[in-house]
Amino acid sequence: MKKMVVPGWIKAYFGFIVANWLVFTLMRGAFLAVFHAALVPQSYSELWKTFYIGAKFDMRLACALAIPLGLYFTVCAFWHKARFVRKGMAALYGVLEACVMLIYMADFGHYAYISMRINYSIVKYAENALISLQMAWETYPVVWGVLALLVWGALWVWFTNWVQKKAFAQSDAYRWKGNLGWFFGGLLLTGALMFGQLSQYPLRWSNAYHSTNNFICNLTLNPVLNIYDTARFVKADSYDAEKTRQYYDTVAQYLGVDHPDKEALNFERQIPDKPKDQQKDYNVVVIFMESLAWNKTSMNNPDIDPTPFVKALADRSILFTNFFAPTSATARAVFALVTGIPDVTSFKTSSRNPLIVDQHVVVNALRDYEKYFFIGGSASWGNIRGILEHNLTGVHMYEEGRFQHEHRNDVWGISDLDLFREANRVLNEEQQKEKKPFFAIIQTAGYHRPYTIPDDNAGFVTKDIGEDLAHRRSFVSVAEYNSLRFSDHALHEFFKLAEKSDYYDNTIFFIFGDHGLSAPQSENMPRGYVELNLIDHQIPLIVAGKPIQPRVIDRTASQVDILPMAMGLLGRGYFTRAIGRDVLSDDSKEPGALLYGWAASPATIGFVQGEYYYHSQGGKEGLYKYAADNYNEDISKQEPERFEHMKQLAQGLYETSRYQFYHNQKRDERDE
C-alpha cells in the first residue's frame, strides 16, 4: 500500500493557522490574567466552556487570516513561477498581523476603561480624530505600543517567509490530480473549522453569551470578530435621546413611572409584593404557538374549525380578544416577551444584535424558581440563545439533540407533538425531583412551510376543505390549514399529558401566537383588518389552568405585557424599565398596543386602543376605526384630541423602545 504523503504546502498552511490560533489563545489567557478581579467564584466552573467556545472563535479568525496564504500556496502548487510574490505575501501578513494585534491592544484598553469588549462603535472616535488621538497620547504608552507593533509585524514577516520556504522545501511533483485533491480537502477542512460546530447553524456570537455573568461572556468573545459582528447594527440602528425626551411625559404617565425625570429619562418602576396571603407559587408555562393568528382560529372560522382545542380551551380560560404582537417575526416575538420591549429595530432582529444582548428580565425576580426553555430545533436560530442564556438566570435549555426521544421532522427540528411530549416529561420529572416551582417557555415551529405532518401524529387525520375555501378563509392552501390543525392537535395532546402530571393543578399556562400572518382574502374578517394589515399582528392570548377563573377580556394588550401579567398572578414584586405592564391585575392601566411594521418600506408605526388605530408611514398619518365599514376613512380631524394622544403614545413608545434597547441592562447582582 502506497504511503500517503501530505504536500509541504498543506502542512505549512495549517501550521500557519495553528500558530495564529495559539497566539489568540494566549491573548485570551492574558485577558483573564489582567482582568481576573471581575471573575466571581460562582463562575469558576464556567471557565472551561468559556475557553472551549472562545477557542472556536479564535480558530475562525485564524482560518480567515490564513485564506490569502492558502490561495497563494494553491496557485504556487500548480504554477511554481507564482512564487515571485513571496516577499509581497510576507509584507501583507506583517501588516495584517500588526493590525490584529492593534485591535487586541485597543480591546484591552477599551475594556479597562468601560468594562466592555471593543466593537464597531469604536469608529465613532474617528469623528473627532484629533481629540481621540490626543486622549490616547495622554492616556496610553503610545510610543511603546507603536514600537511593539513594529516588532510584531516584523516577526510575522520573518515567520511568513519561513513558512513559505517550508511549504516548497521538498520536491513536490506539480501534478494537477494530486494537488487538486489536497486543495479541496484543505478547503473543506477550513470551512468546517470556520463553521465551528456540529449543528444546523454555524457558531454565532450568541454562543459567547452562555452565562448570565458579563465577564464570562466578555472573556469568550474574540475582539476582531466582535467588531465584524457589531458593524451592521451600529450602522443600522441607534436611538435618539432628544426624541425620547420629546414624548417622555406621555409615555411616563402611560407606564406609571414611579419618579418621572425627563432629563434623566427615568422609566423605572418598582412593583411591590402583594400581601403574603395573595402570593402564590404557581408554575408558569408560556407557550409560543407558531403563527397562531387571530383571523385563522376557530373563533373566527367556526365552520372549518381549524383550532377546535384552542377554542375549547379559551372557553374555560381567560381570553384576550384584542391582543397584539408588536411585530410580525418570531425572533422579534421572543425578544418582546422576554425583555418586555417591542422589537422595533429596522435591521434584522434585536436578538441578532450583540450590542443589546444584556437585558433585564422581570421573571428573574423569581429566584426560587427553576427556569426552562424548550424548542424543537436549535436555539441558535435567530441568535435567541444569547438573549435567553445570558438574561434568564439559570435557564435549562432543551433543543434538538438534547431530548430523550426525538425524530427530526423537517428543517424546524422535531415535531410540535414530540416537543410537547418531551417538555411534559422533563417538567414532570423535574417537579418530582426538585419539588420547586418552575417557569418554562415552550416554542413551537411546526406550523411553517413545508407543513410537514409527522408519521407519529397521535391519530391526526387531515381534512380537505378545497383550495378555494382555504384561500377565502385566511389560508394559502389546504396544506397550511391542516398544518395549523395539527399544531392545535399537538397542543391538545400536551394538555392531555399535563393533566395527568404532578404539576398541572398548580400551573398557569399562557398560550399565544408569536405573530399574525398576511392573508389577502380573509373573508372571515372585517376588511379593515386586512387593508390596515392588523392581521399581521392580532393574535389570541389564553391564560389557562385550574387557578384561573374564566372570562373574556376585550381591553387592548400586547405580548410585552405577558410576563408582568404572570408576575401579577403570582403576587410577586419586581423591578422594570420596559414597556410591558400588568394589565390583567390592574384595570387602571390605560389599554394599548404599539405596532411596528418593519417589513414595509418605509416602516409603519401604529398604536391600537380599543376600536381605534393610529397609523403612520413615511410622513403620512391618520386615525381609523379598523373594524368599521368606513375603515379607510381618516377621522383624525373629527377626533383631534384622541388622534394627538394616540400619536404621542405611538411615536413615544417607538422612540422609548429604541432607547431602552441600550438602557435596560441588569441593575446589579440581584438580577443575576
Image (cartoon, rainbow, N blue to C red):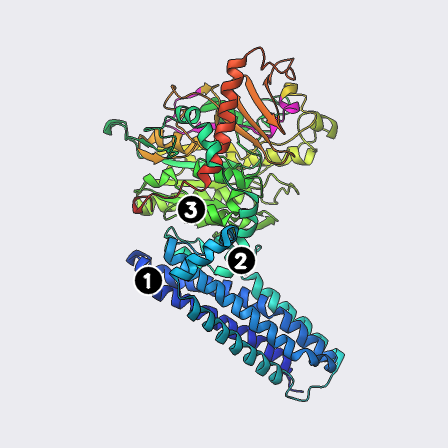
Mark 2 vs mark 3: in front? 3
Q: Nearer the viewer, residue 570 or 551?
A: 570
Q: Label 2 is placed on what type of residue?
A: Leu
**Residue under numbered circle 2:** 203
Is the residue marked by circle 3 packed among few (<14), some (14-19), or many (20+) residues within 10 Å?
Answer: many
Quick check: marks 2 and 3 in contact, CB under 8 Å? no
Q: Is residue 562 magenta?
A: no
Q: Quadrant of the N terminus?
A: bottom right
Indicate the position of residue 142 as horizontal and vertical percent values: 43, 66
Q: CA distance from mark 1 to mark 2?
A: 26 Å
Q: Nearer the viewer, residue 338 or 316?
A: 338
Where is residue 583, by image quadrant?
top left
Q: How many marks?
A: 3
* N-term-proximal mark, 1 vs 2: 1
Q: Secondary structure at mark 2?
A: loop
Quick check: marks 1 and 3 in contact, CB under 8 Å? no
* N-term-proximal mark, 2 vs 3: 2
Is the residue marked by circle 2 packed among few (<14), some (14-19), or many (20+) residues within 10 Å?
Answer: many
Q: CA distance from mark 2 to mark 3?
A: 19 Å
In this image, 81 relative to 283: left or right?
right
**Residue under numbered circle 1:** 36
Quick check: marks 1 and 2 in contact, CB under 8 Å? no
* N-term-proximal mark, 1 vs 3: 1
Indicate the position of residue 347 as horizontal and vertical percent values: 58, 42
Q: Secondary structure at mark 1?
A: helix
Indicate the position of residue 477 as horizontal and vertical percent values: 70, 33
Residue at 63% across / 18% down in the picture? 526
Please report the bounds of the magenta region as a residue range: 529-551
Q: Label 3 is placed on what type of residue?
A: Asp
**Residue under numbered circle 3:** 358
Q: Is residue 641 above or below residue 8?
A: above
